[in-house]
Image (cartoon, rainbow, N blue to C red):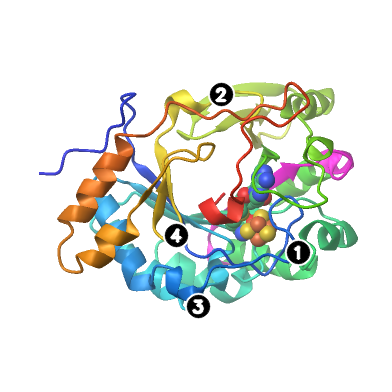
C-alpha cells in the first residue's frame, strides 16, 4: 500500500493544483505583461502526460485536484482531460475535481464540466463595470464572462467569485460586488494582490489594498461573524449576518497561513512547486518521460519533493518595499 504524502512539518499533502497551460485569452494587469512570451508547446506536458502525473498523485493520496493556468479552458481538448479524470471521482479516490477560470469559455464548456463530475468552480472577476473590466483584463470582455457565469449556474455548478482587491480600482465596488453575488447565491472571496512576476510599468505597492482595510469597510455595512471553516488553504471566511452570505479573504501578505498548507502546485511543464512563495521546485517531467511504462521513479521524485516542502513563504510589503518577490508569474505556477 502507498503511504500518504507527509511533509517535514507533518502536513499531509492531499491537494494538487495543476496549471495546464501558461497561455490565456486575457492579460490581467497584475498577472501578465501585454507582450507575454509563452512557452514553446513541446515543453508542455501532453494531456496524456498530465493524466499520468495526476493519476500518480491520486494514487499517493491526493484527494483534490484544481485545474488552473493561465486560462485552463483555452487549452485545446482540455475537456478530454476532465472526462478522463472523472474516473478517479467515480472510484472514490478523488473527492473533488475543480477549476479556476476567467469565465470566458464557460458558455462552451459548463455542461461538459458538470458531466465530468465538476460541481464547484471559481471564477475570477474584479469589477462589474464593462470599461473597467476591459482595462484590468486588457483583452477581456465582460458580457462574455457574464454569459459564462450564467451558463455555469444553469449547468448546476456552484460558483465562487474571486476578486483581487485593487486599490483605487474596485474599492468603490465592494458593496456592489457583494450584493451582486448574494443575489445570485454565489460566494465571494477577495484576494490580496501578490508580488508575482516582474510586470513592467505596474506599481505593486500602489495596487495593494490590504484586506484588513477591505474587511473594516465591509463591517461598516454588515455584521461579520467569523467562521471556523478552513479550506486547508489561505482563505479565511466570515458570514454576513444580514444576508447569510459567505465571504472569503485570501491574505498571504497580512496573515501567515502556511501552518495548515496541504497543497503543492504542478506547472504545465511538469515542475512541482512545493510553495507558491518560494523558488524551490522539482522536475517531474524527466522521471515521467524517461520511464514511460514505470511510475516508480515518478513516485519517488514526488516523495523526495514533498520531503523538501518549506515551512512557509516570505512575502512582505511591510517595509514599503517588496520583500520575497517571486520572479515567476502567477500564470506559470497557477493561481
Ligand atoms: N485564468 C484563470 C483565472 O483568472 O481565474 C486561472 C489562473 S489565474 C493565475 C488564478 C487566480 O490568480 C485568479 O483569481 C487571479 O485573479 C489571481 N491572480 C493572478 N495574479 C495575481 C497576483 N499577482 N496577485 C493575486 N492574485 C493574482
Ligand atoms: Fe489570464 Fe487568469 Fe492571469 Fe487574468 S489572472 S491574465 S485571466 S491567467
Label 4 to label 3: alpha-carbon separation = 19 Å
Q: Quadrant of the N terminus?
A: top left
* Figure quadrant of residue 245: top right
Which disc number belongs to residue 256?
2
> Which element is circle 2 on?
loop
In the rendered image, which residue does mark 1 sit on?
Answer: 34
Q: Is any atom of residue 236 visible in this view? A: yes
Residue 321 position within the rendered picture, expressed as x and y whole percent measured from the top left? 75, 28
Disc 1 and disc 4 in contact, CB within 8 angstroms: no
Q: Earlier in the sequence, mark 3 or mark 1?
A: 1
Question: Relative to 57, is 325 above or below?
Answer: above
Residue 237 location (% of width, % of height): 60, 30
In the rendered structure, are the residues bearing label 1 and label 2 in contact, judged by CB atoms less than 8 Å apart? no
Q: Position of residue 196 (x, y in %)?
A: 64, 45
Q: Closer to the camera: disc 1 or disc 2? A: 1
Range drawn in magenta: 155-174
Residue assigned mark 4: 118
Which mark, residue 190? none
Q: Nearer the viewer, residue 22 or 93?
A: 22
Asked if the residues shown at circle 3 and circle 1 are in contact, with their CB atoms under 8 angstroms apart, the answer is no
Residue drawn at x 47%, y 38% is 275
Q: Residue at x 83, y 63 (%)?
A: 134
Amino acid at each position: 500500500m502507498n503511504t500518504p504524502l507527509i511533509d517535514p512539518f507533518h502536513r499531509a499533502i492531499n491537494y494538487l493544483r495543476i496549471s495546464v497551460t501558461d497561455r490565456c485569452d486575457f492579460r490581467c494587469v497584475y498577472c501578465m505583461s501585454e507582450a507575454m512570451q509563452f512557452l514553446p508547446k513541446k515543453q508542455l506536458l501532453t494531456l496524456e502526460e498530465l493524466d499520468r502525473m495526476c493519476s500518480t498523485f491520486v494514487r499517493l493520496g491526493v484527494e483534490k485536484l484544481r485545474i488552473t493556468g493561465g486560462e485552463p479552458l483555452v487549452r485545446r481538448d482540455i475537456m478530454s482531460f476532465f472526462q478522463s479524470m472523472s474516473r478517479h471521482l467515480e472510484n472514490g479516490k478523488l473527492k473533488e475535481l475543480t477549476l479556476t477560470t476567467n469565465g470566458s469559455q464557460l458558455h462552451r464548456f459548463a455542461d461538459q464540466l458538470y458531466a465530468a463530475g465538476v460541481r464547484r468552480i471559481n471564477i475570477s472577476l474584479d469589477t462589474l463595470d464593462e470599461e473597467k473590466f476591459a482595462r484590468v483584463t486588457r483583452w477581456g470582455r465582460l458580457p462574455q464572462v457574464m454569459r459564462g457565469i450564467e451558463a455555469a449556474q444553469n449547468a448546476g455548478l456552484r460558483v465562487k467569485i474571486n476578486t483581487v482587491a485593487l486599490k483605487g480600482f474596485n474599492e468603490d465596488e465592494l458593496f456592489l460586488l457583494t450584493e451582486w453575488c448574494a443575489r445570485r447565491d454565489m460566494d465571494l472571496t477577495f484576494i490580496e494582490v501578490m508580488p508575482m512576476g516582474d510586470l513592467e510599468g505596474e506599481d505593486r505597492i500602489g495596487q495593494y489594498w490590504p484586506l484588513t482595510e477591505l474587511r473594516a469597510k465591509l463591517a461598516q455595512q454588515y455584521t461579520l461573524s467569523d467562521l471556523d471553516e478552513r479550506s486547508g488553504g489561505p482563505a479565511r471566511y466570515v458570514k454576513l449576518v444580514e444576508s447569510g452570505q459567505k465571504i472569503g479573504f485570501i491574505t498571504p501578505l497580512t496573515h501567515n497561513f502556511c501552518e495548515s498548507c496541504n497543497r503543492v502546485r504542478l506547472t504545465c511543464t511538469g515542475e512541482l512547486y512545493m510553495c507558491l512563495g518560494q523558488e524551490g521546485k522539482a522536475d517531474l517531467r524527466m522521471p515521467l518521460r524517461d520511464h514511460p511504462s514505470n511510475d516508480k521513479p515518478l513516485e519517488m521524485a514526488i516523495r523526495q519533493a514533498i520531503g523538501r516542502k518549506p515551512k512557509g513563504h516570505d512575502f512582505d510589503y511591510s517595509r514599503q518595499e517588496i520583500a520575497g518577490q517571486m520572479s515567476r508569474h502567477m500564470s506559470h505556477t497557477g493561481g
